[in-house]
Amino acid sequence: MKKVDQWNGVVFLIISGLICWGSSHFPYGNVHNPGPGFLPLWLGIILGALSICLIIKATLQTKGVRMLRELLTEKIRWGKVLLTLIALVLYGFLMDYIGFLFITFLFMAFLIRFVDPQPWKRVIGWALVGSVGSYLIFEVWMKLRLPKGFLGV
Amino acid sequence: METLQHILYGFGVASQPINLLFCFLGAMAGTLVGVLPGLGPTAAMAMLLPVTFGIPPTGAVIMLAGIYYGAQYGGSTTSILVNIPGEAASVVTCLDGYQMARQGRAGAALGISAFGSFIAGTIGVLALSFVAPPLVDAALSFGPPEYFALMCLGLTVLTFLAHGSMLKALMMAVFGLFIGTVGIDPITGVQRFTFGRPDLMEGIGLVQIAMGMFGIAEILSNIEQTIKISVFEAKLKGLFPNLEDWKRSIGAIIRGTGIGFFLGILPGGGAIISSFASYAVEKRLSKHPEKFGTGVIEGVAAPESANNAAAQGAFIPMITLGIPSNVVMALLLGALMIHGITPGPLLMTQHPDLFWGFITSMYIGNLMLLVLNLPLIPMWVKFLKVPYPILFPFILLFCLIGVYTINNNVFDIYLMILFGVFGYLVRKLHFEAAPLILAVVLGPMMEKALRQSLTMSKGDFSIFFTRPISAVLLGVAILLLALPMIPRASTREKIVKLGERD
């Protein structure tokens, strides 16, 4: 189990198992009159079969195989990716409480400052452009109802 | 004669000032997103889809067509100037386009790609107007088994043409079909995989998935490395190709258009394969094939015309049968459905304004790109020069606003992030996102067709093989699935490699 595709296969095999298990809760019907559980169950079975094929193929393959170690030692800036994801989730979480204008300013400033750090002047400037600009376009001009938050903007 | 009348009627609809405005806005916005690194027509359509929700259906569809063309054109611009293809279809344009830019001929390359697209668009739209009505008649004889078979074929072709492993592409397609089953079962009303959440009752929205897997995932992949874009510092002058350029390109444009249009009609085919194929054909026909890749103008003209013509061809299965043949069409279908319109054989008779207005607006969109967008190239280049650390929060913000405004629901934001992470991971693991997205759209339609077929035949699967059209379609699909398993005869690898090498 040193190859990436072996693990891919295993993960999808587990997913297919979950799909089959989930589908078993709905009426299967019969071939004459398939029920809501019919297609998902078969999709789960097909996905499982394909996953097993992938595991076998990866195990037998010798040339041009991607090893797990290569994937794990790739130079990736995981920290930056994680920071961006945290910012995205927090944006969704806080949007309704803080309101669109302010949360957007904070979101932009955070990303510009911390992902690939820029000088503060730039951070504030671009965050203002992004938040006020999008507020004017989407809220004022296009009249989309964006969340107001406790500050009322 | 009747067709001509229809076309004139279409022009009447498309040239109403308000529709012209929508077309213009779409083309501009599409170009803007298409110019951004890594974001192609698919991402552009997904990101800008919500903007069209508040517009009447005809205007919305016209705007979306504008976005599509704009994004495609924006993608060519980045291919030529920066050597970064916005999406797979413009990979080929990079080969000669970027070399031309390095030789100081960026203007001519951009010019010929715009003119080529325009000519291809013109021929394509005419062909479409003549081919669509008879096909609509044929489509009316399609029953559930034929629909099911055609959708199977579409998905199979898409996985067959996938860049990496076909097995993995198939897995993505099957997983996509599963995602399509989430929500209330349309036949029995049973809730499937909703975990009791009302937000999931209507299923997982296409926009949330597409924006996540094409928008957010793209950004995450870019952030993980330090990317530096070096815009080619060439003076952009002489956007009009000279006489010599025209002489060399006109044949390539016509051939590219033919190849593109016919490959575009095939389900699952479309822009990518046609741009590769037309480039390969030009290389073979050329008197100096060794010069391809060093900046020959035919190498830009052919694929650019082909992918534009393919886009027109791809509308055929979409507007006649209501089946999207690629991801862009899938998004368009999603948009139509949000507006309460179901594409299919009845579209032409029930919504003639929309049908013909849409077809002709594609033409007008092309013209608009030519007249308005070409002079704006220096402005688009300025966008490319905005440093990525400042650019990407803006793209994310646009995705967030776009997805939130679909239902004014924060849950959609979480779904988009979830699919963004999923898209990022599967990309790292060399899976392709396109089959999944197409499958999500086709899933519910396929399930309905399958269940109806089985009910019709009282559970007899042979219904798919005793009806001639569905038998042929399924036969081709099975053949394509079997091809990679036959050792030595790995035609698929040859086709894909041929494209990549060329």
Image (cartoon, rainbow, N blue to C red):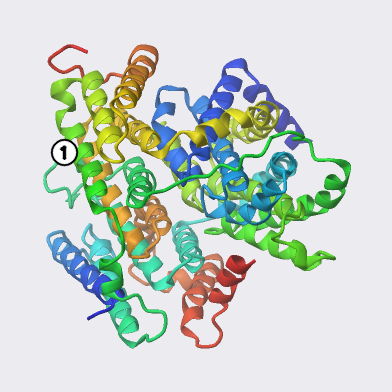
Q: Is residue B301 above or below residue A71?
A: above
Q: Is residue B36 above or below residue A39?
A: above
**What residue sits 38% from the left and 43% below the top?**
B215
**What residue sits 37% from the left and 57% below the top?**
B436
Q: Position of residue B336 (x, y in %)?
A: 45, 36
Between B214 and B485, the residue placed more toward the observer is: B214
Q: Would residue B73 be found to the left or right of residue B206 on screen?
A: right
**What residue sits 40% from the left and 34% below the top?**
B391
Q: Position of residue B278 (x, y in %)?
A: 70, 59
Chain containing mark 1? B
Between A32 and A10, the residue placed more toward the observer is: A10
Quick one: SS at disc 1?
A: helix
Task: Determine the image quadrant of residue B118.
Answer: top right
- Number of on-image labels: 1
Q: Would residue B70 be found to the left or right of residue B171 on screen?
A: right
Which residue is under mark 1? Answer: B198
Q: Would residue B162 be found to the left or right of residue B457 on screen?
A: right
Q: Can see residue B350?
A: no
Task: Determine the image quadrant of residue B370.
Answer: top right
Q: Position of residue B456 (x, y in %)?
A: 38, 62
Q: Can see residue A148?
A: yes
Q: Mark 1 Cα within 10 Å, few/some/many (few <14, many 20+)?
A: few
Which image quarter is the C terminus of chain A in?
top left
Amino acid marked by disc 1: Pro
Task: Determine the image quadrant of residue B168.
Answer: bottom left
